[in-house]
Amino acid sequence: MSRLCIIFDLDGTLVDSEGLCNQAFLDLLPDLDGTVDSLTMRYRGMKLATVLSDIEARLGRPLPADFEVTYRRRVSELFDSALRPTPGTLEMLEALRCCKCVASSGPPAKIAHALSVSGLAQYFGEDVFSAYQVGSWKPDPGLFLHAARSMGYSPNQCIVVEDSPPGLQAAKAAGMTAFHYSPRTHPGDSDEGPHVVFHDMTDLLRLVDHAERSA
């Protein structure tokens, strides 16, 4: 059994999905002020219900009752046509020998779809956990703690790989080591903080190897 378990965030970490998710808002809401990049920075790691409330406040009107269904349908269409793994992720997963799982704030159907169309489902099997299944969203640590228990590891044996402030906060609250994936394509990210920061997914192999030898 591996001495460490790697808990991966999904959106913006394993798959380059955040731009597509925010493009869907712009496609459906032409009067929403912003660009894909600005919306990505504003909403990264946030629960969808919180995002929709913020959008309503910005628009000054309520969204249609069926907007979430329409939005998720549009995201699914964009995933089918354009979703890809983040650079270096396929190579990293091929070489990674530690126990690993996915813990995402998205609903199970979205997670499964993203992993399938990106070609990453084979690397995780059934070891995929959704905030919707446990009723706990980042920055609350509940999702990560549930993932650790399900995988058979204590929090101090887990490394969380995250790209968003809420995810990093959740990892800290869970008592887990956090590795902050911060690609150069994310303007405004800072290398400051108590967590390890890396910019290329292939660098994760070296970081995990060092952590495992130190465990």
Image (spheres, rainbow, N blue to C red):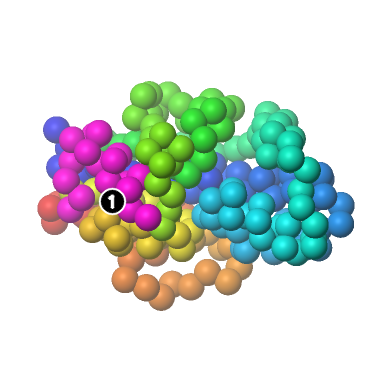
- Residue 31 visible in image: yes
Q: Is residue 95 left or right of residue 120?
A: left
Q: Is residue 6 left or right of residue 13?
A: left
Residue 82, position in %: x, y? 69, 36
- Residue 87 visible in image: no
Q: Quadrant of residue 166?
A: bottom left
Q: Is residue 179 left or right of residue 57?
A: left
Near-viewer residue (150 or 68): 68
Near-viewer residue (52 or 162): 52
* Magenta stretch, residue numbers: 140-156
The answer to whether residue 155 is magenta is yes
Residue 185, position in %: x, y? 60, 60
Q: Mark 1 belongs to which amino acid?
A: Ile
Residue 5, position in %: x, y? 24, 42
Near-viewer residue (26 or 86): 26
Q: Is residue 6 left or right of residue 202?
A: left
Near-viewer residue (41 or 62): 62
- Name the image quarter holding the N terminus: top left
Q: Quadrant of residue 153?
A: top left
Q: Residue at x 17, y 53 (%)?
A: 156
Q: Dot 1 surroundings within 10 Å: few (below 14), some, or many (20 or more)?
A: many
Q: Which residue is mark 1?
A: 159
Label 1 element class:
strand
Q: Residue at x 66, y 45 (%)?
A: 21
In terms of secondary structure, what is the magenta stretch mainly? helix
Q: Residue at x 43, y 49 (%)?
A: 137
The answer to whether residue 147 is magenta is yes
Q: Is residue 75 above or below residue 45?
A: above
Q: Is residue 130 above or below residue 26?
A: above
Q: Residue at x 35, y 45 (%)?
A: 143
Residue 174, position in %: x, y? 27, 55
